Amino acid sequence: MKRFVVMMLVSIMLVVTAMPTMKAKAASTADEWYNITMASMRAKVVNGTDGNDIAYSATWYSGLSEVEVLARLLYAEAPWWIADKKCVAMVLWNRVQVGWYASTLYGVAVQNGQFATITGSVNETAGARIVDIESASWQNALRYACTIYVTGTTNPKWALGISEFSYQRDFRSFLSFNGKAYDLSGEPHINIDGTEYGIYDIYIPVHGYFETVAEAVNQYLSPSNAENNLPYYADGEGVNIYFGLE
């Protein structure tokens, strides 16, 4: 009997000791996080009603996993082009690395004043709160969120397939960029909340880099974009414009 009790205790200790490893192993790669998150979200869909749509509150995201919050941010900030989602993901990662913001991806995502799609008003957060989990847009957003979530200190731009993306920590929609950015003696600047900043590495997904604000704006407005299947302001399915802040 004594031997049996000892064996039982040893077995329990082995199981308890293994639990952290088992838990980590359950979601240690981007693919594993993706599969677990999608399974959890699909389980919330009942009788054709998507249980993943969340009513507004100031902390509507508080019950979600970190990965899902990141994915909802990418989904809302870059609803159309895949390349745009990847760039938003890199901005999140770049903000963590620079040390001016929160020290984690989730911390940056929910930090006040960073992303209105997460911490803004009822209208500003609608794109992140209401998702179509079976759409390609959502599944791509979740995949890229999982990719940056598991990279740690390793730069994820290679895993995302945007090796040309570098130090951009900010972005604006075209309308916002066009209204606030300007060239001063050939040097790009932008006005953010009444403060003037020098900017560099102006980048438009698919289009590439531009040295001046005028070059970026003219390229984005060019009608030839439609013919070449490039992001184009007039087509209603635009991308953000990214840049570094001096």
Image (tube, rainbow, N blue to C red):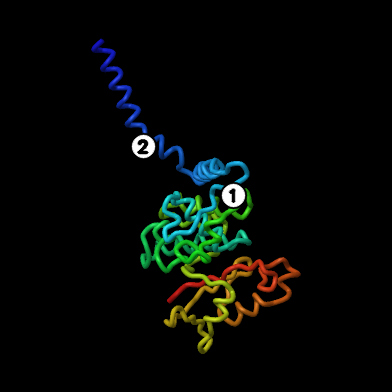
Q: Tell me the quarter of the image containing the C terminus.
A: bottom left
Q: What is the x, y in percent for residue 143?
A: 55, 50
**In the image, residue 134 above or below residue 244:** above
Residue picked out by circle 1 = 133
Residue sitting at the far bottom: 185
Q: Is residue 100 left or right of residue 183?
A: left
Residue 200 numbered tag: none
Residue 211 picture quarter: bottom right
**In the image, residue 159 above or below residue 166:** above
Q: Amino acid at mark 2?
A: Pro
CA neighbours of label 1 inside 10 A, class few (<14), some (14 to 19), many (20+): some
Residue picked out by circle 2 = 20
Marks 1/2: CA distance? Answer: 29 Å
Q: Is residue 9 left or right of residue 83?
A: left
Residue sitting at the far top: 1
Q: What is the x, y in percent for residue 106?
A: 42, 56
**In the image, residue 228 above or below residue 103:** below
Q: Depth-wise, is mark 1 or mark 2 nearer the camera?
A: 1
Query: Which of 89/44 is in front?
Result: 44
Q: What is the x, y in percent for residue 191?
A: 47, 81
For marks 1 and 2 on the same chain, the one whose residue lies earlier in the sequence: 2
**Residue at x 61% of width, y 80% of height:** 215
Q: Is residue 6 left or right of residue 234?
A: left
Q: Amino acid at mark 1?
A: Ile
Give the secondary structure at mark 2: helix
**Residue at x 57% of width, y 43% of height:** 45
